[in-house]
Image (cartoon, rainbow, N blue to C red):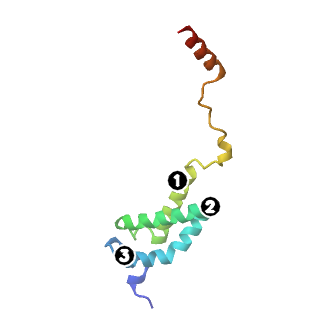
Amino acid sequence: MADDTDSDDGLMERVAGGDAAAFDRLAARHMRRAVALAQRMTGNPSDADEIAQEAFLRVWQHAGRWDAARAAFTTWLYRIVMNLAIDRGRRPGWSPLEEAGDPPDESPDALARIAARQTAERV
């Protein structure tokens, strides 16, 4: 039987104290499901990987804020993942380069060249 220090709650207490090994264990235990949730929400595997990594970065940075009396660790983690995925969906998407069209021609148009030539002739 696993002791209490190996439970998510026990690991989070250790993470809050700066225990990197406990964090690694939590990440190994929950990363796959965090990526899967992010991918279901975004439909994009690359975005899902980034979201899951960002979620675990936030777990590390804010471990002291987690309260076992208010939510299970997985509930807290999945809420972070969902919020990050929602935020990612609010960002404007990337458009294919072909949609950008040709860059505007910065050279003077025919009318401007004629006017410049006439001005030069008068001077």
Query: Split into 4 quadrants, where in the image is the N terminus?
Result: bottom left
The type of residue carrying mark 2 is Asn
The type of residue carrying mark 1 is Asp
C-alpha span from label 1 to label 2: 14 Å
Question: Are discs 1 and 2 less than 8 Å apart at CB?
Answer: no
Q: Report whether 43 appears left or right of 77.
A: right
What's the residue at 38%, 83% (across, down)? 5
What's the residue at 51%, 74% (across, down)? 30
N-term mark: 3 or 2: 3
Spot occupied by residue 43 in the image (x, y as percentages of width and height): 64, 61
Spot occupied by residue 24 in the image (x, y as percentages of width and height): 43, 76
Tell me the quarter of the picture where residue 58 sits: bottom left
Q: Report whether 53 appears left or right of 109.
A: left
Give the secondary structure at mark 2. Answer: loop
Give the secondary structure at mark 3. Answer: helix
What's the residue at 56%, 13% (across, down)? 120
Residue at the far top: name it.
122
Residue under label 1: 87
Residue under label 2: 44
C-alpha span from label 3 to label 1: 28 Å
Residue under label 3: 20
Quick check: 30 above or below 53? below
